Image (cartoon, grey):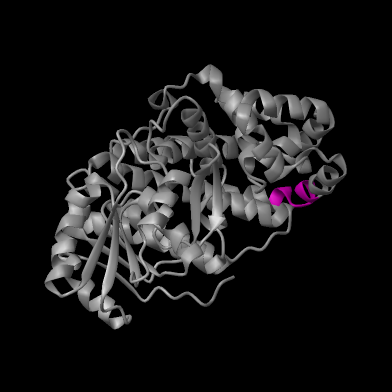
């Protein structure tokens, strides 16, 4: 875990934009600042921030990441920020939400120039994290990066964000139901590191956000502030643990897989948080299906499980990932088709089944509850929103687990009998 976090200031309040010159002076920045925006975030906050900084005698450079369609955190965006930098720049300020934050964070980690964030929407939980998800060679990879020296969210700006960005943030937050559950089962089955303290803090922020969720539709300032606070706390949990494990599980892998398919088809069509919210519902259904079984049923399914050969695995990956297949092999290799390692995991699964089953019954809600939460804020809850059919779902679940090596409910289902469990989950 990382106990040396150095985010100097987090400020979420009304008119917070006007406090940025003081924040910069407190951290020793007194001359040149580079703002990184797109046309939308410049209009929302960048233009006013530029005037505020110039009025306080800062030299302000501007890097505009303009696109015809959606801005993607790819090599082009990283290159544009790098080539806009000048030697006199003391700090970069990312004015925006997910994409701009991820790009500037990565550049900061490579150049050692600090960066701060002016959030323009409560749309995702990566503001405080030290990882940067980028699209490289068309494949989403998460890079170890750095953290911001400050995070500012002016509630006047946040509440005026497009409502689908607000529901996107809510979708990202409810994903913690399954990311925390995946982390727990991973710690039991693979004996990976687990922090009960971080898990409890993340769950607390999830519950606090749910308490005010019905007020998000009216863009109530207190509800928006609570959502933004929960998103930042989730990022702090990742920063404290040292990676994204507390906040990213199967629901994110499913989202990343769909996003990869969108990119291969020409561009990202739906927000990250919208996909995560929908896939949280799917992941919850999978948890409920798996843990409806008793130990004897699990043992029987393991015995009936069909082994996937190396040739079958490689054919499936190349068929479903196309030009991205080599990236998958590079990331996970053939780790999960090693039957000797699987037998070790299967023994741990059976040994700890009743303990895990009890934990899941106390911590994983029903899919109906996730539906209710998403419907309350008028967020999408069904795969049809993503242009997907129910008939496609099994193939998505079969392959999304290959997006990361991380152990999740999808890997647990695979260790038991993936084909049978997916049939059970989809049926219900």
Q: Check if residue 15 falls in the magenta segment.
A: no
Q: Is residue 126 left or right of residue 391?
A: left
Q: Residue at x 78, y 25 (%)?
A: 312
The x, y position of residue 397, in whole percent, is: 60, 30
Q: Residue at x 66, y 23 (%)?
A: 319
**116 to 221, vertically: above or below:** below
**278 to 190, vertically: above or below:** above
Query: In terms of depth relative to the viewer, which is nearer, 424 or 255?
Result: 255
Q: Is residue 133 left or right of residue 171?
A: right
Q: Residue furthest right?
A: 340
Query: In terms of depth relative to the viewer, which is nearer, 274 or 349?
Result: 274
Q: Residue at x 49, y 64 (%)?
A: 109
Query: From this viewpoint, is residue 70 visible?
Result: yes
Q: Please count the marks in the image.
A: 0
The x, y position of residue 413, in whole percent, is: 68, 37
Q: Quadrant of the N terminus?
A: bottom right
Query: From this viewpoint, is residue 173 visible?
Result: no
The stretch of residues the image draws in magenta is 348-354
Figure quadrant of residue 26: bottom left
**427 to 28, vertically: above or below:** above
Q: Quadrant of the C terminus?
A: top right
Query: In terms of depth relative to the viewer, which is nearer, 177 or 256?
Result: 256
The x, y position of residue 236, in whole percent, is: 45, 65
The x, y position of residue 257, in whole percent, is: 54, 34
Classified by dominant secondary structure, the portion drawn in magenta counts as: helix
Q: Is residue 243 left or right of residue 222?
A: right
Q: Is residue 17 left or right of residue 365?
A: left
Figure quadrant of residue 322: top right
């Amino acid at each position: 875990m990382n106990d040396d976090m150095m985010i100097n200031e987090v400020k979420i309040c009304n008119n917070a934009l006007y406090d940025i010159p003081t924040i910069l002076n407190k951290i020793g920045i007194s001359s040149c600042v580079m703002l990184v925006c797109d046309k939308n975030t410049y209009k929302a906050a960048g233009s006013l921030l530029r005037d505020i900084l110039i009025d306080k005698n800062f030299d302000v450079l501007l890097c505009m990441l303009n696109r015809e369609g959606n801005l993607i955190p790819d090599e082009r965006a990283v290159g544009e920020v790098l080539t806009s930098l000048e030697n006199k720049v003391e700090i970069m300020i990312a004015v925006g939400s997910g994409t701009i934050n991820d790009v500037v964070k990565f550049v900061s980690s490579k150049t050692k120039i600090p960066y701060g964030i002016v959030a323009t929407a409560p749309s995702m939980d990566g503001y405080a994290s030290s990882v940067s998800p980028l699209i490289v060679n068309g494949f989403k990879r998460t890079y170890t990066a750095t953290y911001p020296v400050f995070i500012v969210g002016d509630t006047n700006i946040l509440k005026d964000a497009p409502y689908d960005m607000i529901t996107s943030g809510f979708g990202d937050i409810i994903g913690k139901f399954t990311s925390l559950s995946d982390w727990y089962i991973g710690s039991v089955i693979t004996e990976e590191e687990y922090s009960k303290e971080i898990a409890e803090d993340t769950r607390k922020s999830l519950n606090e956000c749910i308490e005010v969720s019905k007020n998000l539709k009216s863009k109530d300032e207190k509800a928006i502030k609570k959502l933004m606070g929960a998103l930042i706390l989730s990022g702090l949990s990742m920063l404290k643990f040292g990676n994204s494990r507390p906040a990213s599980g199967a629901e994110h892998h499913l989202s990343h897989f769909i996003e990869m398919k969108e990119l291969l088809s020409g561009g990202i069509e739906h927000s990250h948080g919208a996909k995560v919210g929908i896939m949280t519902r799917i992941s919850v259904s999978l948890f409920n299906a798996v843990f409806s079984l008793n130990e004897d049923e699990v043992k029987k399914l393991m015995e009936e499980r069909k082994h996937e050969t190396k040739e079958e695995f490689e054919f499936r990956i190349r068929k479903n990932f196309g030009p991205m297949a080599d990236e998958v092999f590079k990331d996970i290799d053939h780790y999960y088709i090693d039957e000797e390692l699987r037998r070790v995991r299967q023994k741990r699964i059976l040994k700890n089944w009743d303990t895990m089953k009890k934990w899941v019954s106390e911590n994983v809600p029903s899919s109906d509850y996730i539906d209710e939460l998403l419907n309350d804020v008028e967020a999408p809850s069904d795969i049809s929103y993503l242009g997907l059919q129910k008939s496609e779902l099994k193939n998505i679940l079969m392959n999304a687990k290959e997006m990361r090596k991380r152990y999740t409910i999808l890997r647990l289902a695979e260790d038991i009998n993936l084909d049978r469990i997916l049939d059970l989950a989809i049926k219900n």
